[in-house]
Image: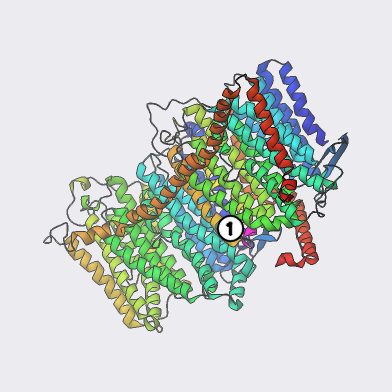
Amino acid sequence: MSSFFSQSVWLVPCYTLLGMGLSALWMPSITRKTGPRPAGYLNIVCTVTAFVHSCLAFLEIRHQSALKPSLVWLKAADLTLTIDLDISSITVGALILITGINFLAQIYAIAYLEMDWGWARFFATMGLFEAGMCSLVLCNSLFFSYVILEVLTLGTYLLIGYWFNQSLVVTGARDAFLTKRIGDLFLLMGVVALLPLAGTWNFDGLATWAATADLDPTMATLLCLTLIAGPLGKCAQFPLHLWLDEAMESPVPATIVRSSLVVGTGAWVLIKLQPIFALSDFASTFMVAIGATTAIGASLVAIAQIDIKRSLSYSVSAYMGMVFMAVGTQQDETTLVLLLTYGVAMALLVMAIGSVVLTNITQDLTQYGGLWSRRPITGICYLVGAASLVALPPFGGFWSLAQLTSNLWANRPLLAVILIVVNGLTAFSVMREFSLIFGGKPKHMMVRSPEGLWALVLPMVILTGFALHSPLILATLDFLPDWQQLNLLSVGCLVFSTIFGGGIALYLYLSESISKPLNVVPESIRDFFARDLYTAELYDNTVVLGVAFISKIVDWLDRYFVDGVINFFGVFTIFGGQSLKYNNSGQSQYYLFSIVFGLLVFVYIIFYPYFSSLSF
Amino acid sequence: MLSLLLIIPLLGIGLLNLCPQQFSRNIAAVTILSTFSISTWLLFGLDLSNPELQFTEFLPWLEILGLNYNVGVDGLSLPLIVLNGFLTLVAIYSIGENNNRPRLYHSLILFVNSGIAGALMASNLLLFFLFYELELIPFYLLIAIWGGKKKGYASTKFLIYTAISGLFVLGAFLGMTWLSESPTFDLENLTLSNLDLDTKIILLTVLLIGFGIKIPLVPLHTWLPDAYVEANCAVTVLLGGVFAKLGTYGLIRFGLQLFPEAWQSVAPVLAIIGTVSVMYGSLAAISQRDLKRMVAYSSIGHMGYILVATAAGTELSVLGAVAQMISHSLILALLFHLVGIIERKVGTRDLDVLNGLMNPVRGMPLTSSLLILAGMASAGIPGLIGFISEFMVFQGSFSRFPIPTLLCIIASGLTAVYFVILLNRTCFGRLNNDLAYYPKVILSEKIPAIALTLTIIFFGLQPSFLTRWIEPTTTQFVATMEMQTIALEAEQPFISN
């Protein structure tokens, strides 16, 4: 069997980069002549090429062993940077997912940005995003993984800042960039510190090194923590989760990609780094603790939101918390399956929500109601997305969550319980949204709400079909868990939690007899969760205030102290000259006196050694 | 051949003063283009296997003083000379169309170009000093004539500061030559090994203060914000891009190369000063309200990285330091060029007033896109030149000074903070449609920006094109330094204790 496509699979990120470059050419002056659309179409063509190439490569590589080519990029002094690639069925499979969802998101963007003139900018950054993700999955070197994560941070900033004349967008972009950058810089510290120890950044090399490394435990823990910090920011985990919900200000097509794929890139890097985390027990515990906290916290916060998109964004954080728990308990393969099923389901949910928001102007859940009769296709897509997200057999999410819970049940029952609770809460949250949007009678803003343009509906429906088939796909790829090995009790609890959570939401929000808005919890608790545990206020009053304060002090010191001393010398010199000029009185006695006085001082200094040696 | 780089600009000055003043820009551009091509040609003719000075020329001059016309270039100076030509071209086009004294301006710019090239190629201490001091005159005039409101204050402050810097440098040079009893000031005759360590440390300290003013290092930096802000942006491109680099160049050429053992003793202190500069510059930049002032403080921060890396003195860090010099020059030049465009078109530099320049219809989309790129390059986003040079600095210095390096990494996060503030205030936001009637950005302003951008991206993606010239020389420096330190320790084992 030929291996042309798998050997040249490195072209996939290049296609998307080419797409970026072509779109970026459509500057305003060209856009004025041709309209903005060619930029988008060119990019879509590049994405399709990338998708087709990945599929062909997958067919080739499926039954072959992994290829690991490498290329020296920079050799400077004792530093050698090589571009290491890892071309295996898993990475190429991830490429298919990435290019596929990107393709659908770009089609979706045709409709979503129908009236927008900034296509060039949008598609160029989408191309950058896609190229970043494609190269990240292919990359087999920690250094380049870091590089790509940074580029993705830049891409996030530009995509969120797309509608830059709205103030919320500007702050959202700022927060996303800075929060992710904090994580990235910790990762950079880890990357820099790791090289002298391990001598390589190649993931395989690192694994070999970590197996035999003899490292000071404190050092190992610190190293692992810095390496976790980068993915922590990417996956929007506590305490760096704040950016994700502000990022919802970006256009929905970008949100599709970000919520389903980009957040997963952090987890991907974590899986690659797994051998190093074996050096420190604390690191794994830390990951699990962060993941569990985020999972519970974010799923509660999601329930308290009244903004459609923000509610969904906290579910993303919650899910990534589960992914962190999975990585922290060394279940790499399950994590990958979880990322796959999650990616498809979340993309579908965001698409459905976006199509609702686009034609209904508002994002406020309390304004919605009764869309089921107006938007059945969107409703069905949302339901399929929700069912694939949570553990509901036979949909996709069930299989990965069941495997995860069942693995945890025996050794770490607490984590399994947390997982079941989070699953229930997520089911509640998505069904709450569903009931509020689609249930009940149409409210006045919802009376006229048609399905969107074909470009909006088609990708959604395609993805629905894919989500429905995902169990079959998992089965073909041998990713389905073995029934014999599953702990049926845990799986039962899991399914029950889904049905219970979803059922309660449906009952509470659909039942006519219960008055809305619900008042089941005290206002202070509701506010606590609705305002994201006051994290934004916490940051404003600590880190932001601190940096602002210190920079003010430095600026003040610079202006008045450092520069003040210098200016004092200047003023002093002028003052000295000005006051000394009055000595020029014209009296020759005075001049003579000063000459004699000066001479005496001079003579004294010159002959001081002789005077001091004299003894009287 | 090297002398051509000095003579051609001087001939250009003569020519453009003889011609009508509407030609002076083109004459200056052609002049610089020719020296730029010559220096690029020399770059490709440089023998990379030979780390010593090449293309040397020697002409006895005032032998009684020990001053000879002795020039040569190596992997450290030649890239900077090429850069000098490139940035001078940018400065010629960056001044804008409404330049009311084009002859004087372009003469001074050509003079600056020739002088800086002279300082970079001089291999006689006194000759270096002559060029080093000669720079002050044109720069003083450039700031004082084409400057902003407080140009008198800024230019005088600049002159006094840098003249004092010159005095320290001269003092150190005289001390080095006389105390070591060298016959001339020529670099190759100078061996300081017969001096004892204390004398060397004193001489090195004097030298460091001299160059420290030029770089500038905190707390000797206060001339910089005033000079950079008050000078025209075109002049600032040269000030920050090449003039300040003479300080770091001198540090490596005369500090690291001539005082290998003493360098090891002062290195920890230097690393701390460098780290303080980095933190100080970044923090001070955050609270600025003036676009230009913010970029000026960012420059203080970025020059600190160079000092940390030079202090660390490993092969990679010194290479990184030189790469960072070049990358910082390119990025700074792009930033100031764009800031200059914004200042000219919008009429303000106030971050509280500027808004929404990304607007594709009434704003300046290309300028702001490139400003975003420049800001990101300065903040160290990969794929651009700033990242790889900073990374070499970090990786190279980490083994020697782990804590300062980590602090520098944190400071690069602060860089991101102020650039995001800058970009959010200028490029993002809502443009005031009633006031936004800005003149169009013309092609001669766009071309330098695009050329700089392409260079930044090119070296970001292909850094080996940058490092290949520098590496032989810096490797040689470090090897000599390590060899001499080892030799010294073998001779006087107590030093290592």
Q: Can residue A475 be seen in this view?
A: no
Residue at the location (66% across, 62% down)? A70
Q: Is B364 colored magenta in this rendering?
A: no
The quarter of the picture where residue B82 lies is: top right
Task: Tell which of A435 and A555 is nearer to you.
Answer: A555
Residue at the location (36% across, 72% down)? A398
Taking the image as shown, residue A198 lies to the left or right of residue B376, namely right
Q: In which quarter of the image is the N terminus of chain B?
A: top right
Taking the image as shown, residue A252 lies to the left or right of residue A514, namely right
Task: Tell which of A77 and A392 is nearer to you.
Answer: A77
Magenta-drawn stretch, dominant element (helix, strand or loop): helix
Taking the image as shown, residue B283 lies to the left or right of residue A208, namely left
Give x and y (percent) for residue B118: 76, 36
Residue kind at label 1, given as amino acid type: Thr
The quarter of the picture where residue A80 lies is: bottom right
Q: In which quarter of the image is the C terminus of chain B?
A: bottom right
Label 1 sits on a secondary structure element that is helix
Residue at the location (39% across, 71% down)? A289
Q: In this view, does B310 lie above or below B336?
A: below
Give x and y (percent) for residue A361: 28, 44
The quarter of the picture where residue B58 lies is: top right
The residue to which callout 1 is attached is B405
Give the farthest residue toward the front: A616
Give x and y (percent) for residue A494: 31, 75
Q: What chain does mark 1 sit on?
A: B
Judging from the image, the colouring scheme is: rainbow
Give x and y (percent) for residue A33: 49, 31
Q: In this view, does B338 lie above or below B461?
A: above
Taking the image as shown, residue B434 lies to the left or right of residue B476, namely left
Over which residues does the magenta segment extend? B394-398
Q: In this view, does A182 lie above or below A212?
A: above
Residue at the location (68% across, 60% down)? A79
